[in-house]
Amino acid sequence: MSITDAAADADADAAAPSAAEVASHHHLLPPPPLASPVDLMDPSPSSTTRAVPFSSGNPRIEETHGIMHLYPEDAASRSHLPVGRKPLVCVLAVPNHMTYADFCRFCGSFVQHMLEMRIVRNDGAEDHYSVLITFDDQSSTDSFYKHFNGKRFSSLEGDICGVCYVVDVQYTGSIEHSQCSISSSAEQPNCPVCLERLEQDYGGILTTICNHSFHSSCISKWTDSSCPVCRYCQQQPEKSTCSVCGTSENLWICVICGFVGCGRYIEGHAITHWRETQHCYSLELETQRVWDYVGDNYVHRLIQSKTDGKLVELNSHCVQCDDVFGTCTCSGDSGISDALFNSKVEAILAEYNDLLTSQLENQRKYFESLLLEVKEENEKEISEAAEKAVNIKLQKLQMKLAKCVEEKKFLDDINENLLKNQEMWKAKILQIEES
């Protein structure tokens, strides 16, 4: 259904306000100043509306909380739209795997009639988000509702698009988690992508879940799910679990193939993986240390310092120092210390090369044995298939031979009976001729 055709079916009681009125009364970007507790206690929406709490912003920097008042589900249908509705709707439960560009493509030709879109997260729903949309007129809003309400986001999935008319949006609070916060959308008059002013005449404004605003045409070209400004991703990373038992404690990941298994004090699936594949190096996810199952110890020689990020030797201390913290105040020849450091680095490189060579050799032997096993299995399957085919063909030939023998026996019986009848008739003819 096109917007022009659907606009003709809109109710006559909803007068379409102008774009200036929409921008002045239902402007979602930036958020309005926080109301006092007295103002918030005086609800302007009707008591029959449905209140849905929401939040937006980067949880590490600043969060904005609010409540959107929606019309009841039974108050709106395709034939009877709520009276006194505004050109403001909310698309609920959009799956997280849909990026901003995917949602813009899903809306299609309606994007050019949208003044603003704000991405918010519903409280308690981590795998979905909602979109508050302000349209330029009421007919476009009604057409959008009739076209997308109850429609699937994708033909391959079961997620259904739910569109609700919004009575009012109230911002209840803002929490700052950091002093040096990133500039908010109110401090960004220009689009960070095209560097043009954020004006609604150029196809609408989209505000991401981290409160950064862009032109809809600019953000629709961004295929990543993260924000182009702060790189905050709406899809939070999943917690690692054991590939076998599903536990999230004491996890080890194989540095060769990436298999995640639990430690030997839980179920021992990591060490079982080593016994099956001979992948002897495993990284502990909690401490980021590598364990060698063959040597039964950690293989670290150098670690990264947390203060300056440089590589330092693990548990290093001067042999002439008695300090329990391993700090040395003696000053030696810089040339000797450089030579010692270079020799240590060369020894570490040589050891690493030997370990890598031995590991690659073990992997070569292991995969060659796998290829040999696969080859033997294929040859065995081929021989079994050929023998089975020969047996089937032999059975068919034997059945055909038995059938031919049976037919020959039947024909021989018929021939014998015909010969007996012939002799009998010859005797009768002779008797007739004699008589």
Image (cartoon, rainbow, N blue to C red):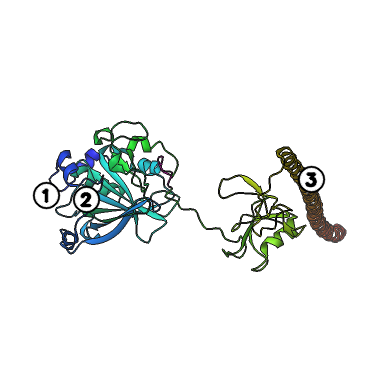
Disc 1 element: loop
x 75%, y 42%: residue = 340
The image quarter in which residue 186 lies: top left
Residue 261 versus residue 161: which sits nearer the camera? 261
**280 or 60: nearer the viewer:** 60
The x and y percentages for residue 82 are 18, 55
Dot 2 falls on a residue whose secondary structure is loop
Taking the image as shown, residue 151 lies to the left or right of residue 434, namely left
Q: Which residues are magenta?
A: 226-232
Q: Kindly identify which residue carries mark 2.
A: 33
Name the residue rendered at 22%, 38% in the picture.
4
In terms of secondary structure, what is the magenta stretch mainly?
A: loop
Q: Position of residue 53 (x, y in %)?
A: 29, 59
Q: Where is the N terminus found, in terms of image quarters? A: top left
Q: Residues within 10 Å of mark 1 (few under 14, many from 20)?
A: few
Mark closest to the chain's N terminus, 3 or 2:
2
Q: Which residue is mark 1?
A: 13
